[in-house]
């Protein structure tokens, strides 16, 4: 019961995988979550086990509260505790505002925002049994800045950042710290769905004061900091990791 446990949603690839591997390197046992492709999740679990940690793979569409309940029930059955919940899984419909339909809105909001509320509820119940924990979500600059074709995702990420503040206050008495990490344009598999991907990356590389685009490891570094004891007094904050691009007009 002393072994620390982390759940990272959408952790079969990209930023989620980077965070999961970093946590494994710090001695955490992992729950790898995926929605569609099982093999990448199994591959990630194998990498974690090669680091000497236990990893289980759980399929769950985090936009459905009943599937979230099943996910965290599996955590309790397999590990009996939870110390870290990283709300990383994301999706969204990338279309101009006037082309959006109700199902596009619902799909994006469910996976990106609803999942944090109901995931945090389930996580907190488990964390309370082991004296507290840490919750970190992944956001993006589209939450505070306009990005083309990004309406549903940007609004859902704004909801994530607002929820982060509310969760931070209401879960504090349970010794649970809640924060978020927001990134600029990151070249991951998710970005391949953007119709203007190459333009986005080229513009970001040219304009970023730090001289390069943000990489998944940069966001993983920030998440690991917020999940550490050193960040204990950081509560309800969204840490922007963008090489300074959001400072420009």
Image (cartoon, grey):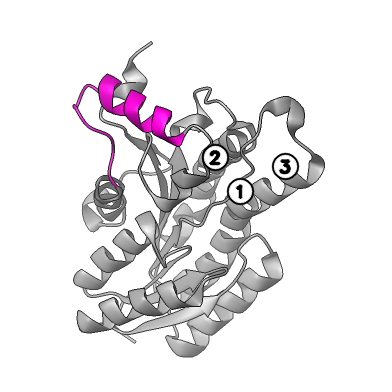
Q: Position of residue 219 (x, y in %)?
A: 30, 47
Q: Is disc 1 surrounded by few (<14), some (14 to 19) or many (20+) residues within 10 Å?
A: many
The C terminus lies in quadrant: top left
Q: Which mark is residue 105?
A: 3
Crowding at label 3, few (<14), some or many (≥20) Cα neighbours within 10 Å? some
**With respect to residue 29, does 123 lie above or below?**
above
Residue marked by disc 1: 113
Residue carrying label 2 = 157
The quadrant of the image that shows the N terminus is bottom left
Query: Marks 1 and 2, how far apart in space?
Result: 7 Å
Provide the residue span drawn in magenta. 197-215
Q: Between residues 212 and 4, which one lies in front from this camera angle?
A: 212
User: Is the Cβ of the residue at disc 1 closer than 8 Å to that at disc 3?
Assistant: no
- Residue 203, image x and y in percent? 35, 23
Q: Are marks 1 and 2 in contact (CB under 8 Å)?
A: yes
User: Who's the residue at 40% across and 80% down the image?
Assistant: 42
């Amino acid at each position: 019961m002393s072994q620390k446990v982390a759940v990272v949603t959408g952790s079969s690839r990209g930023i989620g995988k980077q965070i999961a591997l970093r946590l494994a390197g710090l001695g955490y046992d992992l729950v790898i979550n995926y929605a569609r492709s099982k093999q990448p999740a199994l591959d990630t679990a194998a990498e974690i086990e090669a680091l000497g940690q236990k990893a289980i793979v759980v399929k769950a569409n985090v936009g459905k509260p009943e599937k979230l309940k099943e996910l965290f029930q599996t955590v309790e059955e397999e590990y009996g505790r939870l110390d870290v919940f990283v709300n990383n899984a994301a999706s969204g419909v990338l279309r101009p505002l006037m082309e959006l339909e109700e199902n596009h809105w619902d799909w994006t909001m469910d996976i990106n925002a609803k999942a944090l509320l109901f995931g945090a509820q389930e996580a907190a119940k488990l964390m309370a049994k082991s004296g507290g924990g840490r919750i970190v979500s992944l956001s993006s600059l589209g939450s505070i800045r306009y990005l083309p074709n990004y309406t549903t995702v940007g609004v859902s990420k704004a909801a994530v950042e607002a929820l982060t503040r509310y969760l931070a206050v209401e879960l504090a008495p349970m010794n649970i710290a809640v924060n978020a990490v927001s990134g600029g344009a990151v070249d991951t598999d998710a970005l391949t769905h953007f119709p203007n991907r190459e333009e986005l990356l080229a513009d970001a590389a040219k304009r970023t004061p730090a001289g390069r685009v943000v990489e998944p490891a940069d966001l993983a570094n920030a998440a690991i900091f917020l999940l550490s004891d050193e960040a204990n007094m950081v509560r309800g904050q969204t840490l922007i990791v963008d090489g300074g691009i959001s400072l420009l007009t």
